[in-house]
Amino acid sequence: MRIGIRTRVILLALISALPLVLADVYKAKEARRVALERARQEALLLARSVAAANADIINNTRHLLTGFASHAQADPGELFGARCTAGLHRLLEAVVASILLMARELRLRTVAEGVEAKEDADMLRSLGCDEAQGYFFGRPVPPEAFDSSG
């Protein structure tokens, strides 16, 4: 098959432009990757800010609804048991659900700390919390009594 001079010129132009096109494609991909990473970092900062704000809301609301300003002032059973009003329980569950949803959207794994009751563990499991730890699962033990095999 014979190709004319005009076709050769077009092919040469395309071949010589290929490295420039590939470089532009790479730059565009890299720019998109950098933008996505920047957006992810900003989303993580926002998530941390929201979590801190939620913690403040919980502490302020806990004080208003239960009379305890912090965990240190109350037996956890009193705070989240008999003294925990239905309104506070719904508020805490809504805040936890929001945090877990945000973490899922950011593709982050979640770990709940300080789980002390079966009801709390069940609620966290139903809301999709990845892992949990606390007295409900096991009390602290000294290092010499810790068995890593089981």
Image: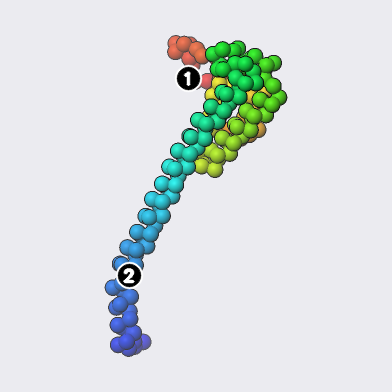
Disc 2 is placed on an element classified as helix
At 61% from the left edge and 24% from the top edge, which residue is drawn?
61
At 51% from the left edge and 42% from the top edge, which residue is drawn?
106
Decide which of 114, 68 is in the foreground and name it.
68
Residue 33 horizontal side relative to residue 83, left or right: left
Decide which of 113, 138 is in the foreground and name it.
113
Which tag is nearer the camera, tag 2 or tag 1?
2
Q: Amino acid at mark 1?
A: Ser
At 54% from the left edge and 13% from the top edge, which residue is drawn?
72
Residue 114 position, x and y percent, is 55, 21
Disc 1 is placed on an element classified as loop
Q: In the figure, 36 relative to 96: above or below?
A: below
Q: In the figure, 148 relative to 105: above or below?
A: above
Residue 97 horizontal side relative to residue 44, left or right: right
| Circle 1 residue | 148
Residue 143 position, x and y percent, is 44, 13
**CA–CA distance in space, label 2 to label 1:** 58 Å
Decide which of 7, 2 is in the foreground and name it.
7
Residue 31 position, x and y percent, is 38, 55
At 60% from the left edge and 31% from the top edge, which residue is drawn?
96
Q: In the figure, 121 relative to 42: above or below?
A: above
Q: Amino acid at mark 2?
A: Leu
Residue 14 position, x and y percent, is 33, 75
| Circle 2 residue | 18
Snapshot colouring: rainbow
